[in-house]
Image (cartoon, helix red, strand yellow):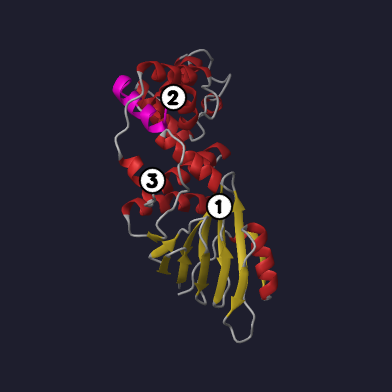
Amino acid sequence: MAVKELLSGHTLFRTHDLDDARDQVARVFCPHRLTTAAASGEVDTVHNSVKLKDVSLNYLDYGAEVNITPGELNSFFLVQIPLSGGGRVTCGSQNIESSTQVASIPSPTEHLDMTWQAQSPHLLIHLSRHSVETRLEELMGRSLSAPIRFDLAMRMDNPGIRSWRQIIDVLVQNFDSDVPGLHESVQAEIESACITGLLTAQPHNYSACLTNTAEPAAPRSVRKAMSLCEEKTFDNLTISEMAAHAGVSVRSLQEGFRSYVGLSPTQYLREVRLRGVHEELNQFENGDRTVSEIAAGWGFTHLGRFSHYYADRYGELPSETLRGA
């Protein structure tokens, strides 16, 4: 059964020429050796790509069987998910057979060599190595002592990986649409969740550090984070920024909020923003400003989700508050 071509509205190139395919793919990823087992010496390559801030989504199909030897990736991680077919992936001392059930995530610091079978289109998720390492340091609250080395095999039936794949699918479906429906700030949040989700779902040499219980941040640090929420209510504030401002790790801040506030940091920020919307809705006459305008001004980009949060908090819809002002 033919596999749907993903990201078809974002085509970088199509070519039958092997050298052209190698040169154009190298511009997106890195220089590499590319050969084909096809008797004709030709390929039938299509490469579609969407670049976000720290993550890019790629659909790549060579059509024919190819051998790809990049050596070391160095500056990025590349999750390689076969959508059909599969191949062989060797990275350092690890060697796996990839398939629709077993994806791969090579270490950027180890030698990589791959063979993709014919008719093996892949969904490739390119992640900045710097961003992944920085996020891990934030989660642990300390610097890395060695490069991150993920297990090469990514088991797609693993519950954590299934959840992570759903995050990826949201982004892919958004850019597969004629008109992307996600606001840029929402895309940024999903992109951040993609990096964090990968670190928590796929085993690596620091996984044990993430499963150990973190000491709750002290009340003083929690208060600093709470003050930042009050000061930067309108900004696209992230939990990583809150933790950095408080001088603690993300996990320590989360534990501190649970212990001293009874909410997660993101829940607290949402409460601050809901309070701001509520006060503003009570200040305007109906018709002066719309609910969506006011909500967007306080960082709520999904009106339906905002209305649910608001009604749960205040016992009425935001439109009812505005009418009663």
| Distance Cα–Cα, label 2 vs label 3 | 29 Å
Q: Which amino acid lies under the numbered mark 1 shown in the image of this protein? A: Phe
Query: How many residues crowd mark 2 within 10 Å: few (<14), some (14–19), many (20+)?
Result: many
**Residue 206: image tag:** 3
- Is any atom of residue 14 visible in this view? no
**Residue 189 higher or lower than 62, as above or below:** above
Q: Which residue is mark 1?
A: 76
Q: Which amino acid lies under the numbered mark 3 shown in the image of this protein? A: Tyr
User: Disc 1 or 2, which lies upstream in sequence?
Assistant: 1
Q: Which amino acid lies under the numbered mark 2 shown in the image of this protein? A: Leu
Q: Which residues are magenta?
A: 248-263
Q: Secondary structure at mark 3?
A: loop
258 within the magenta span: yes
Q: Residue at x 37, y 26 (%)?
A: 311
User: Disc 1 or 3, which lies upstream in sequence?
Assistant: 1
| Distance Cα–Cα, label 1 vs label 3 | 18 Å
**Residue 16 higher or lower than 280, as above or below:** below
**Residue 296: image tag:** none
User: Disc 2 or 3, which lies upstream in sequence?
Assistant: 3
| Distance Cα–Cα, label 1 vs label 2 | 32 Å
**Numbered circles on residues, count:** 3
Q: Quick check: 307 left or right of 39?
A: left
Q: Secondary structure at mark 1?
A: strand
Q: Which residue is mark 2?
A: 269
Query: How many residues crowd mark 1 within 10 Å: few (<14), some (14–19), many (20+)?
Result: many
- Is any atom of residue 40 visible in this view? yes
Q: Nearer the viewer, residue 93 or 321?
A: 93
Q: What x and y, as percent, mark residue 221?
A: 41, 19
Magenta span: chief secondary structure: helix
Q: Nearer the viewer, mark 1 or mark 2?
A: 1
Q: Nearer the viewer, residue 114 or 86?
A: 114
